[in-house]
Amino acid sequence: MALTIRDLDDSAITSFKELTGKTTASGALIAAAQMGVANTALLRTAERRIMQLEQALQVRQQALANLKQQCGRIIELAGQTDLFVDGE
């Protein structure tokens, strides 16, 4: 398949060649496009994983907040000696 790309400046071609290690403009463009597709897929996977981890973190933070409340309640109850002293 033949493809003509117009209006691509020399600095872009040089950047693509440096990025891909290819020596021809066409090879560099093809390799850069392939890298873009692969990296987009990796990015989407990473974004999904980040969302999962953020949700897990939120659950754990809520659990810690609940635990903190319960610990405070235990400390409060422990300070009430009349609950633990039988008939004295």
Image (cartoon, rainbow, N blue to C red):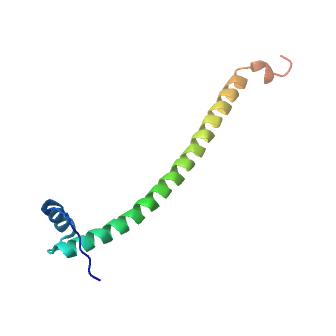
Q: Tell whether 6 sits left or right of 85.
A: left
Residue plotted at (60% across, 45% down): 59
- Quadrant where the N terminus sits is bottom left
Q: Farthest residue in the bottom direction?
A: 1
Residue plotted at (33% across, 65% down): 36
- Quadrant where the C terminus sits is top right
- Front one among 7 and 80: 7
Q: How many marks?
A: 0
Residue plotted at (30% across, 69% down): 33
- Front one among 71 and 44: 44
- The answer to which image quadrant residue 11 occupies is bottom left
Residue 75: % across, % down: 67, 26
Residue 45: % across, % down: 46, 62
Residue 10: % across, % down: 13, 63
- The answer to which image quadrant residue 19 occupies is bottom left
- The vertical placement of 6 against 66, above or below, is below
Residue 69: % across, % down: 65, 31
Q: Tell whether 72 sits left or right of 21.
A: right
- Front one among 84 and 12: 12
Q: Tell whether 54 sits left or right of 4.
A: right
Q: Farthest residue in the top direction?
A: 88
- Front one among 81 and 56: 56
Residue plotted at (62% across, 33% down): 68
Q: Farthest residue in the right direction?
A: 87
